Image (tube, rainbow, N blue to C red):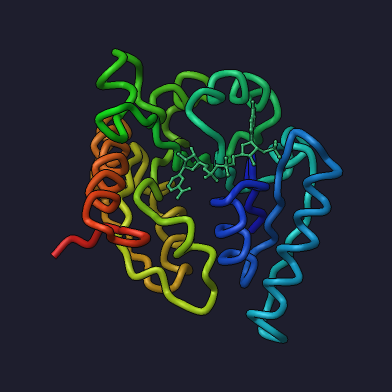
């Protein structure tokens, strides 16, 4: 499968590229094609060190729109503020059957701590802005909001967390669940339709505030 990472040059992008290149052809996207190619070479070197001869996939880099054109699954590793502008550009490029994943957390820091932007500023959850700008809604899946970047990138350890998954089409959710299961120690928990994605997005500021104030490193969520 070809897995494209829009904004894949960032922290989460590195983690997803390293984890999924074991089996899939990962394409790291950037606004700058040269940056994408250079970053992909670095990620590929780390992945080869981790997987050795058992590595069946690859990591390459390209400009975001080219990545969108050739992806079977496209993960939006960009910030909340950039969703609408980026999705409008991507919308004409995506293949009809492309699955879109939003790990995007609408979060900022105030004097009180990390806050969930839609609640404080009467704006839409990230998943809703993605769905508005990359129709059809059925292909959007929301996941990975509470996964620590440090844990995702650390190839020596398994992630040891759950992640909530929201989406309207259970077949498309199943595709994303299978990608989640390929990340060592990560379990998918289906939360419901995309309209409930805000319940997963809002957990991240809560997690970061509690971690910061109680000196907990790289926090995650486990349902017991
Ligand atoms: N970090 C975490 O632990 C974590 C955990 C869960 C969820 N998330 C979510 O995952 C997403 C990515 O987080 P991250 O920490 O990987 O972010 P990041 O390191 O800041 O990377 C985001 C990428 O966005 C691209 N970008 C910057 N400005 C842009 C613009 N104006 N338009 C389009 N693209 C732009 C950049 O790529 P180029 O400059 O190469 O284009 C950058 O590499 C966020 O929505 C975050 O809420 C993060």
Look at the picture and state if 112 lies above or below 119: below
In front of the other: 30 or 56: 30
User: Seen from this angle, which residue lies furthest top?
Assistant: 122
**In the image: residue 132, left or right of residue 42:** left
Residue 34 image point, x, y percent: 86, 44
Look at the picture and state if 139 lies above or below 82: below
In front of the other: 108 or 190: 108
User: Seen from this angle, which residue lies furthest bottom?
Assistant: 53
Quadrant, the C terminus: bottom left
**In the image: residue 138, left or right of residue 200:** right
**In the image: residue 16, left or right of residue 132:** right
Residue 3 image point, x, y percent: 63, 52
Residue 203 lies in what quarter of the image? Answer: top left
**In the image: residue 181, left or right of residue 4:** left
Residue 54 image point, x, y percent: 66, 84
Residue 61 image point, x, y percent: 78, 50
Residue 128 lies in what quarter of the image? Answer: top left
Quarter holding ligand 1 = top right
Residue name at image x 65 percent, y 33 percent: 94
């Amino acid at each position: 499968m070809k897995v494209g990472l829009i904004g894949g040059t960032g922290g989460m992008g590195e983690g997803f590229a390293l984890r999924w290149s074991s089996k899939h052809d990962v394409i790291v996207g950037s606004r700058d094609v040269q940056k994408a190619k250079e970053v992909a070479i670095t990620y590929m070197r780390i992945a080869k060190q981790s997987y050795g001869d058992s590595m069946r996939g690859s990591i390459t880099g390209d400009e975001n729109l080219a990545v969108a054109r050739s992806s079977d699954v496209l993960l939006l590793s960009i910030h909340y503020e950039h969703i609408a502008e980026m999705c409008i550009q991507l919308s004409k490029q995506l293949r009809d059957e492309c699955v879109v994943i939003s790990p995007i957390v609408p979060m900022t820091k105030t004097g009180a701590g990390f806050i969930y932007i839609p609640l404080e500023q009467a704006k839409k959850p990230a998943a809703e802005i993605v769905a508005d700008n990359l129709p059809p809604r059925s292909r959007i899946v929301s996941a990975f909001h509470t996964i620590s970047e440090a844990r995702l990138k650390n190839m020596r350890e398994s992630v040891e967390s759950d992640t909530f998954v929201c989406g309207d089409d259970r077949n498309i959710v199943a595709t994303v669940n299978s990608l989640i299961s390929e990340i060592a120690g990560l379990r998918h928990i289906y939360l419901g339709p995309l309209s409930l994605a805000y319940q997963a997005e809002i957990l991240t500021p809560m997690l970061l505030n509690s971690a910061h104030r109680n000196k907990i490193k790289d926090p995650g969520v486990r349902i017991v």
